[in-house]
Image (cartoon, rainbow, N blue to C red):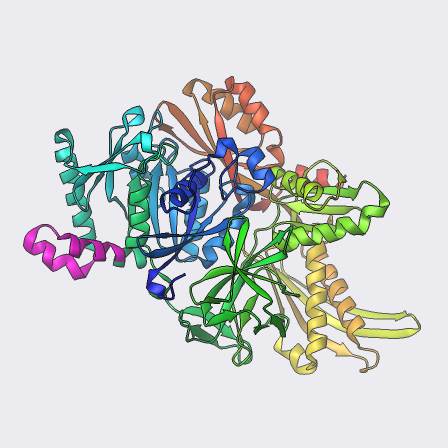
Amino acid sequence: MTSDLTKVRNIGIVAHIDAGKTTTTERILFYTGKIHKHGDVHDGNTTTDFMVQERERGITIQSAAISCEWKGMSINIIDTPGHVDFTMEVERSLRVLDGAVCVFCSVGGVQPQSETVWRQADRYNVPRVAFVNKMDRMGADFARVVDELRNKLKANACPVNIPIGKEEGFKGVVDLIEMKAIVYDEASEGKKFTVGDIPSEMVDDAQFARAELVEKVADLDEGVMEAFLEKGDLTNDELVPAIRRLVVAGKFVPVLCGTSLRDKGVQPLLDAVVAYLPSPADRPPVAATDLKSGDKVERRQEASELLTSLVFKIATDPYVGRLFFVRVYGGVLKKGANAYNPRTKKRERIMKIVRLFADAQIEVDELSAGDIGAVVGLKDCTTGDTLCSEMKPCYLERITAPQPVMFMAIEPKSSADKDKLVESMKALAAEDPTCQFREDEETGQTILSGMGELHLEILVDRLKREFKCAANTGKPMVSYAETITVPATKKFSFDRELAGKRHAVSLEIAVSPLERGKGVEISLSRDFKNLVVDKHLQECVEQGLADGVATGVLARFPMTDIKVECVSAELVDPEVSDEVAFRSAAMMGFREAAESAAPEFLEPIMKLEITTPPESVGEILGDLNARRGNVLDMDMRGDFQIVHARVPMAQMFGYSTAIRSLTKGRASYSMEPDMFELAPKAVREDILSR
């Protein structure tokens, strides 16, 4: 591994499901010499899809980290899932990456999950290049996909190569930088290709595309504007650095094309990764918060800086135990040394460090700034924790997990397996923050929550295969949420004798609604903090309020879009107003306040995209109407009609069967969680009557 940060690229491969991310990653590993024979998704033998469940289903479930080299550059790649149920894997990967390759299907174009991963990349300011894949497929349309990038994603996208031929006749690309044609030899699996003159029938198109590229770059980059105005063109020595500056600044997206499955166009993509995507040295200092003062601080991405690193993922390996995936932003993480965890305020001993090659590991002595690797042997660490220097401890922004939208009851096959099931689910929840479980106090059932039917199915399958813990499960059900619709304030007095000891305190709790999607805000007023100065008692109140929010007031669903504040307190005396009193009063006082604030249910709404033959549109729209759906718009894509709609998740069970029957199997759909909305009166009554 190079110690020169400018020669490192940390990139993610992201896209809508089935756009060809894993196949593209496999070809990258093949052409960089990391593997000597490439696998294919449909054969279940790709390098990064190594889980049994991935190979059986032909989809990526967990993001896999892998390293390779190209033209003297060290490239760390994370192949991410495309299925909406595993969007958390994409979220935490983009959080730690310096650049991304966004793969688009040349037929499907910009699809719903494409928009989701694009927004995630926007949120973390990740520079990206676009790769239009599957150019050999019937209906492939490179120009339309570029237009969709510009119109749907509002990207400053412009091709840096264009296709030679289309559909079955696709045989290579025209490089608009060098103005040369690259034609691939299929017999050599794309390893051999010829670089020559542009075909005569394409010269005009290539010159027009080159002129558009140069003009767009000059328009965005003042550094080359003067040269462009003088000559009407730019030399390659001017054009390539200008494109790189714009990509690193997030102002420009180079677009390339190819077909990974047919071994064409991947080497120019690798060249673009090296030429245009940023190294860790190009990225701005990472923002952190000083643990002691609470002030914002910055850590430069240099080995000479104080240690600052983020645990962004946890995985269980059958041989070495739990692997803690780490991105080092500053300093050096060394084997045998200590690192400080600001959340637990404890030191962690770094027992073993590995570099990752999908499901294999290579042991190393250290990870330096800009590196991604994994640590073995941490005792009390979770996803989103910071590992830093104890001299000046700071913490990085945590990774936020989306709220689960589906749940089911789960129980062990035998009572002897109960403890094993709980421990196994704890391990899954540590790996995957969107997997949550709890015990329902009223029914005694254990409830497992996730992001969808497939997610829950995979979790149960992993319990059985990896953890040897078979379980009985109930029917998957929609995970509603609760909220309040008006502000309310309640004063609650707690005075009980427990185990022969009196516990008493009075708290005033205020609740108010927040905008949709804002989550939960819990705070303590200044008056309360001035009266109760004991930090431990303050934490007890915050924990009591959090417990109340987590269990709701209508039907034990967690509450969201709510602001909760402990306004004031009346103490009895220090012996009686203890932690039990504060915590209990906070939880019960919150419940009383929330019950008087017109609580309502929120139901998860899905964003739906349906691709259907035009003659079936009437049946599709009628069915959506019956499911309480709201059609947003419709447009044509080739010979197919695209319907965009929003539908309550509760109405989407069994939809794949329904749409097949409505359209004789000719339509397809994809959906993703959009947001929570107030449930109508009929749904509220149905939930309360269960």
In the image, the segment drawn in magenta is 221-244
Image check: 648 left or right of 178? right
Image check: 137 left or right of 81? left
Q: Looking at this view, is 547 or 259 the one in front?
A: 259
Q: Looking at this view, is 155 or 527 the one in front?
A: 155
Residue occupying the point 81% across, 48% down? 418
| Residue 25 belongs to magenta span | no
Is residue 126 in view?
A: no
Q: Looking at this view, is 171 or 71 the one in front?
A: 71
Image check: 207 left or right of 677? left
Q: Quadrant of the N terminus?
A: bottom left
Q: Quadrant of the C terminus?
A: top right
Residue occupying the point 26% across, 56% down? 244
Please identify the quarter of the rendering in which residue 122 is found: bottom left
| Residue 229 belongs to magenta span | yes
Residue occupying the point 77% across, 79% down? 571
* Magenta-colored segment: predominant secondary structure: helix
Residue 535: x percent and y percent?
68, 78
Residue 573: x percent and y percent?
81, 82
